[in-house]
Amino acid sequence: MSERPPALGPKGAAAEAIGDRDVSRLRLWLRILDTSNLVQRELRGRLREEFNVTLPRFDLMAALDRAGEGGMTMGQLSRRLRVSGGNVTAVVDRLVKEGAVQRRSPPEDRRTSFIALTDEGRRQFVAMATAHLGWVDEVLGGLEPDEVAALTRLMDKARETAAGRARDEEERRNG
């Protein structure tokens, strides 16, 4: 009989319903989630302590940094960050007030605004990103380079498998 993951409990109704089915992928998912939460908690704490910045703010600034001088629309930011437009708007509004980002509307379409880092915002983000890289290196420092490469390959495969399933399900629904 397979070992039961802690989330199912040793004698719970779900464990009984599952019976002898292989739960190794479920156990993998729980480990991935737990590891992600541990790393994220550490990085959130360090961003707050060192820079008085939230992780969503850091993520938004990272997206804008990758976008370059042209910036991104609010819709593009929302899709990239996988959050609602309201969440993006709140973070952008704060960053605009602080002078870290600016809104620009093209003359031909005043309804669209592009959000871009200011020079000050880029300077702030470079300092945060440099520290962030060091923290990730510390947190995951117990992994050897070949282990990092192997885990990266496996996670890429897992992501592609999940993305393929999501595409198949979307096609089935829209079908």
Image (spheres, grey):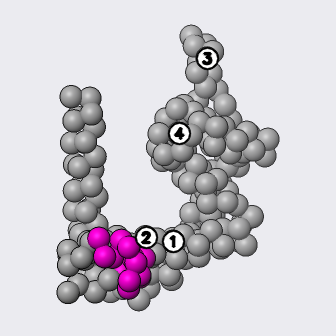
Identity, as a three-letter code, of the amino acid under mark 1: Asn
> SS class of the residue under badge 4?
helix
Query: What distance separates the C-alpha of mark 1 from that of mark 2?
Result: 6 Å
Most extreme residue toward the top, as rendered?
A: 108
Query: Which is in the foreground here, disc 2 or disc 3?
Result: 2
Identity, as a three-letter code, of the amino acid under mark 2: Leu
Residue at horizontal 73 percent and vertical 72 percent from the top: 49
Rendered image quadrant of residue 129:
bottom right
Q: Which residue is mark 3?
A: 111
Q: Earlier in the sequence, mark 3 or mark 4?
A: 4
Instruction: Please say if 105 is above or below 160.
Output: above
Q: Which residue is mark 4?
A: 78
Q: Which residues are magenta?
A: 5-17
Percent across and percent down for residue 174 are: 26, 29
Label 1 environment density (alpha carbons within 10 Å; few <14, some 14–19, many ≥20): few
Percent across and percent down for residue 89 are: 66, 37
Q: Which residue is mark 1?
A: 37
Residue at horizontal 49 percent and vertical 35 percent from the top: 76
Query: Which is in the foreground here, disc 3 or disc 4?
Result: 4
* Residue 149 seen from this side: no
Residue contact between numbered discs 1 and 3, judged by CB atoms under 8 Å: no
Query: What distance separates the C-alpha of mark 1 from that of mark 3?
Result: 38 Å
Q: Earlier in the sequence, mark 4 or mark 1?
A: 1
Image mark for residue 33: 2
Q: Earlier in the sequence, mark 1 or mark 3?
A: 1
Does the magenta portion include 114?
no
Residue contact between numbered discs 3 and 4, judged by CB atoms under 8 Å: no
Query: What distance separates the C-alpha of mark 3 from that of mark 4?
Result: 17 Å
